[in-house]
Image (cartoon, rainbow, N blue to C red):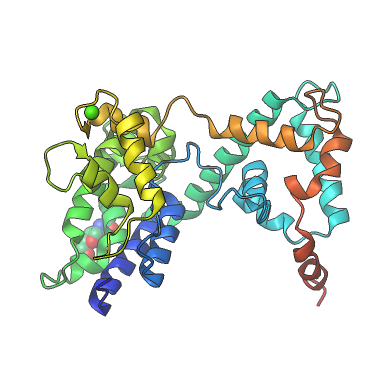
Amino acid sequence: MPCNFGTFFQVFIKLWLSCLRMEFRGLVMCFALCVVYTTSKPTERKDRVHHDPQLSDKEHDDQQSFDYDHDAFLGQEEAKTFDQLTPEESKERLGMIVDKIDADKDGFVTEDELKTWIKKSQKRYIYENVDRQWKDFDLNSDAVISWEEYRNVTYGSYLDDPDPEDGFNYKQMMSRDERRFKMADKDGNHFADKDEFTAFLHPEEYEYMKDIVVLETMEDIDKNGDGFIDLEEYIGDMYNHEADSKEPDWVKTEREQFAEFRDKNKDGKMDKEETKDWILPSDYDHAEAEAKHLVYESDTDKDGLLTKEEIVQKYDLFVGSQATDFGEALVRHDEF
Ligand SMILES: *[C@@H]1O[C@H](CO)[C@@H](O)[C@H](O)[C@H]1NC(C)=O
Ligand SMILES: [Ca+2]
Ligand SMILES: [Ca+2]
């Protein structure tokens, strides 16, 4: 893969900017891309599908670790604090959490209660993330963020010194951001309040922002600009074909997926609706899937309900650090 320093630098800046504002593809994508660009693995795959709400940026592979489950169950920030606890401390705090999840206080946690809890953890993560960034953008501290404030903070150095030689198109990125900002400004008063700014940073969480998520995705992938995503554009978005290398199997599978599931009306390309079904599927609920998974893994007596004992017994699945982390947990002590 031709990857000279200039290109790399531009890509890096772009990624950094994206990460900075936690744009809708989220850190997952940034991370995935960083991996792609730093290791130049041509078969590395990009995941376009938005986890809605995105439960974790970790991979869900219980063989490797339960990190994904921890993030989903606790929210990513809270999961980090649990990593610092000993098994005994984890179990104790998990027990207290179980009391909160059991909303009707009947002593059992149902799949539904678990799902509600997971959604709440996710929302809390999003709000905390927006709160953290808020003061960086609200320059005059008037409790709203104007486009000019956002623009100055995010693109200030580019605006001070626009470099036409620089191949990277900040101008285009900026106008895209401005369009999204205007869309998020629901009441059209030219300022984003907390809720509108959350919609700007996490558009996939808001019904009224879904069209712009789809539009931005299509603009990224639709290289020939005909307003549709054809098979080659679809594959090109996730896979950089290297000359004379054999196409990996997952790419073949994606080709079949495209024909079978993505292109619903079988005209050989994806339109807006088909793209929306792909990146923001309405029939798949990640929180529900995770709740099912957690019940399946911890419901020892298979009655479909979780007792506190069943959950605490599986504390490593829900919150606890893995056996391998335990040594770390022992040395972490703040007293030192
Ligand atoms: C944005 O930057 C410009 C140029 O430096 C400055 O004139 C303007 O006052 C800034 N706006 C805000 C809201 O900070
Ligand atoms: Ca507003
Ligand atoms: Ca189609």
Q: How many marks?
A: 0
Q: Nearer the viewer, residue 91 or 220?
A: 220
Q: Nearer the viewer, residue 286 or 243?
A: 243
Q: In the figure, residue 305 lies in which quadrant?
A: top right
Q: Is residue 5 above or below residue 144?
A: below
Q: Is residue 324 left or right of residue 187?
A: right
Q: Is residue 56 above or below residue 247?
A: above
- Give percent across and percent down for residue 141: 41, 52
Looking at the image, can residue 66 be seen?
yes
- Give percent across and percent down for residue 103: 75, 25
Looking at the image, can residue 209 be seen?
no
- Give percent across and percent down for residue 160: 19, 69
**Ligand 1 quadrant?**
bottom left
Residue at 20% x, 60% y: name it: 170
Residue at 78% x, 39% y: name it: 97
Q: In the figure, residue 184 lies in which quadrant?
A: top left
Q: Is residue 143 left or right of residue 159?
A: right
Residue at 80% x, 32% y: name it: 299
Residue at 42% x, 45% y: name it: 143
Q: Nearer the viewer, residue 252 or 19?
A: 252
Q: Quadrant of the C terminus?
A: bottom right
Q: Is residue 41 left or right of residue 294?
A: left
Q: Quadrant of the N terminus?
A: bottom left
